[in-house]
């Protein structure tokens, strides 16, 4: 089993739709969770950290489910500019931050 | 604009060349990272430096040699690379939190990357 897994997609959604991605992790001791966004041929950019109680930033909501060992990202009211690859990052040990495989999102007019 | 600067942006080198990738950050972060990213794949961790000491080497071949001259700089020396080493090399930094007994990490801040082609 991979340490951090995501559905690669692509997820094709129309503008205005709500879309959700999950990311599962195998190390029950993991404590740090992040969502990154990566555009084609660019570096990953931090979208949001994921806190135990869940957190929201505008149209984006992140949740952590420790019992089932997954994190989720919900995007409401999708925009064309949300089209990108969304990568979850989980620490699998001290300073060892591992990326999931990434989920590609395509938002169409 | 990214606060982590990588040079060069692009590099083409032959298999017998020696070159270096450079990374600089001025955010006061004490952890610095090298990741390698192939097309359509996620970044893969190569090395981590913590307080200028190598703390993680993910079984990277010796033709890649990292160096951390000071808390702001991170280099990756390349020698006798293979064509399959062609990739985007990403440098990142993060605030140091806790110690090896802690499993909390601050988020990574990435540079723009160096796109390396080995011919």
Image (spheres, coloured by chain):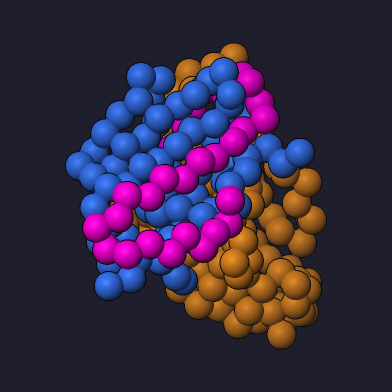
Residue B35 percent across, percent down from the top left = 58, 53
Where is residue B7 drawn, in percent x and y? 45, 68
A30 within the magenta span: yes
Q: Is residue A96 visible?
A: no
Q: Is residue A79 visible?
A: yes
Quadrant location of the N terminus of chain A in the rendered image: top right
- Chain B, colour shown: orange
- Does residue B83 sit above or below A10 in this rendering? below
Frontmost residue, B79 versus B89: B89
Work out whether residue A73 or residue B39 is closer to the camera in this orientation and state it: A73
Q: Residue at x 66, y 26 (%)?
A: A27
Give the tally of numbered discs: 0
Horizontal side of A32 relative to A57 (left or right) equals: right
Quadrant, the C terminus of chain A = bottom left
Residue A104 vs residue B69, the one in the foreground: A104
Name which quarter of the figure residue A16 lies in. bottom left
Q: Residue at coordinates 30% horizontally, 29% vertically from top-left?
A: A55
The picture places residue B105, in percent across and down from the top left corner, at 47, 29
Colour in which the image shows chain A = blue
Residue A28 % position (x, y): 63, 21
Tell whether position A58 is magenta: no
- The magenta-colored residue range is A7-34
User: Residue B53 is drawn in which quadrant?
Assistant: top right
């Amino acid at each position: 089993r991979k340490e951090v897994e995501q559905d690669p997609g692509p997820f094709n959604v129309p503008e205005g739709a709500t879309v959700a991605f999950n990311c599962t992790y195998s190390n029950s001791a993991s404590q740090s969770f992040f969502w990154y966004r990566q555009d084609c041929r660019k570096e990953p950019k931090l979208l949001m950290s994921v806190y135990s109680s869940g957190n929201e930033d505008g149209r984006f909501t992140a949740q952590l489910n420790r019992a089932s060992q997954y994190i989720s990202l919900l995007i409401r009211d999708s925009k064309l500019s949300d089209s990108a690859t969304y990568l979850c990052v989980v620490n699998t040990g001290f300073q060892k931050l591992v990326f999931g495989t990434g989920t590609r999102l395509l938002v169409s007019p | 604009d990214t606060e982590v600067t990588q040079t060069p942006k692009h590099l083409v080198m032959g298999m017998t060349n020696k070159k270096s990738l450079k990374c600089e950050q001025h955010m006061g972060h004490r952890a610095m990272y090298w990741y390698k990213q192939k097309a359509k794949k996620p970044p893969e961790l190569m090395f981590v430096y913590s307080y200028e000491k190598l703390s993680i080497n993910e079984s990277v071949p010796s033709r890649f040699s990292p160096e951390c001259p000071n808390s702001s700089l991170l280099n990756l020396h390349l020698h006798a690379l293979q064509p399959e080493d062609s990739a985007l090399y990403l440098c990142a930094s993060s605030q140091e939190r806790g110690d090896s007994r802690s499993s909390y990490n601050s988020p990574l801040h990435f540079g723009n990357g160096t796109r390396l082609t080995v011919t």
